[in-house]
Amino acid sequence: MIDFHGVILADEVAAQLADVSQRMHAAATDSDAPEVRVLVCGPPGVGKTAVMRALAEDARFTGIHAGAREVRAHYIGQSAVRLRGLFEKARSMAPALLTFDAFEHLFPKRGGSLDDFSDETVVELLMALDGIGRGGRGPAVCIAGEVVDLDRIDPAVLARIPLRIQLPSPDDECRKEILRRALVRHKVSLGANAEETLNQWTIRLRGSTGRDIEYFVRHEAEDAAAPTRDGNHLPADATPSDLVGDVRTQEPHADEALTSPGAPLPEPIDTAGESLDALGLTEPLLTQVRQSARLLRERERFREHHIALPAMLLFVGETQLALRCVRAFAADAKLPLRVVSGQIAVQSEQVHPDWLHSLLQAAIAAGPCVVAITDVEHVVPKHDASYFERVEVMVRPWTAVRRHLDAQRSASTYVPLVFTTSNVEAIDEGTRCRVVLSFELPPAAIA
């Protein structure tokens, strides 16, 4: 176990990063040394972003982090312009490490999408990696990608990024140290038998990622170390599942969805007569929304050809306007639409923390449908002071989203998530980076 600039890593992973750091340093000091290109692979939550920041710090490079919002654009040609601008920014701040989050979503296999947006970013990246259009090598700019699924990346891109670092879930030694530091950071006391409790939790958290451990400490562990409502203490051998409680498979209807996990699933909203054409969207935006709806409508055919289906979409605009678009989108996709208001999550004092998990489980059991959550910034908000006041309510929905997206890759019942928001910057960054498609709906775009 090694502390790599504040990130706890297994010895072999730390050694690989140290080697990459040396190569980066050589690229910055020797014009003949090649620029470093590396993909850091691992499941969500293992700390890929933290590792990239630590790598930039170790090599004394300027770290630049980019995700879908920095690269993807609605208009054809603009994604390539944004990507080119990122490389220009990196060269102006060289030596720099330009890291792309959700790399496989930004640069997927060409020909596997119904639009040209992904293809143009792949072509632009290939040109940047080959040094085309910048007259020689110039300042050192190293490239890194955070990857969950290597198989989804375009082969030409993979061929130009030779280095791979596999970041697994922490082993027992690393997990114990991560847990220990998280407990200290959040000032959680385990009482007189602290070391024994720490060892027991370390064993019971096997398979958990660093993010899982962080959330466990922030919420469940704090609950375990504090008196419960009846004045008793949870046992030292409590597990995350013990603390989460019983997760029902039945679920919510509108307001009841948040307060009673045994309530029925919301009835589908009537979308008869809804039409995307009636919204007066600009032509490029209308085309993109329509193509996404077609993917959902003809999902079985596309799955047979191994074309990835969007599992999470985001409509950005005024609440009622965005909901109109969602209704028309679901109608065009020919899927039932079930809607829950995200504002209830902050208005109700009786919110059940597992409401979203239960809702998604019930939706899957009911059959293919679109699950829409309006004002999602209230459900998965950015981490700030107010976030921690109702953290139990906020974190478990975020975890439910992540697990649902992972499960949808191989699920037989297709249940995409559609979110609406009027303030995208208020949404948790971990959720935003997993949005496959984002539709910005300025009022001027609507007739």
Image (spheres, rainbow, N blue to C red):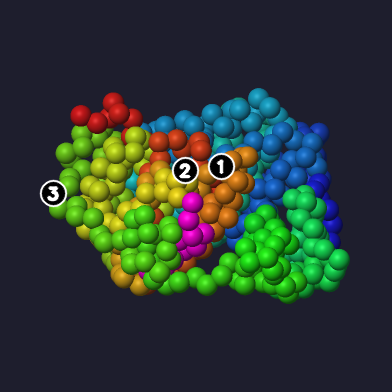
Q: Which residues are magenta?
A: 349-362
Q: Residue furthest front?
A: 230
Direction from residue 273 to residue 250 in the image, left or right? right
Q: Residue at x 49, y 60 (%)?
A: 352
Q: Are marks 2 and 1 in contact (CB under 8 Å)?
A: yes
Residue 88 relative to residue 11: left or right: left
Between disc 1 and disc 3, whose residue precedes? 3
Residue 179 rendering spot, x and y as whole percentages: 76, 60
Q: Which mark is residue 302?
A: none
* Residue 389 in the image, given as x and y percentages of width and height: 60, 46
Q: Residue at point 71% right, 49% down?
A: 51
Disc 1 to disc 3, C-alpha distance = 36 Å
Residue 444 versus residue 199 in the image, above or below:
above
Foreground residue, 423 or 294? 423
Distance between the alpha carbons at the discs numbered 2 and 3:
29 Å
What's under tag 2, amino acid-wise? Glu
Q: Which residue is mark 1?
A: 382
Query: Badge 2 is on which residue?
Result: 377
Above or below for 18 versus 11: above
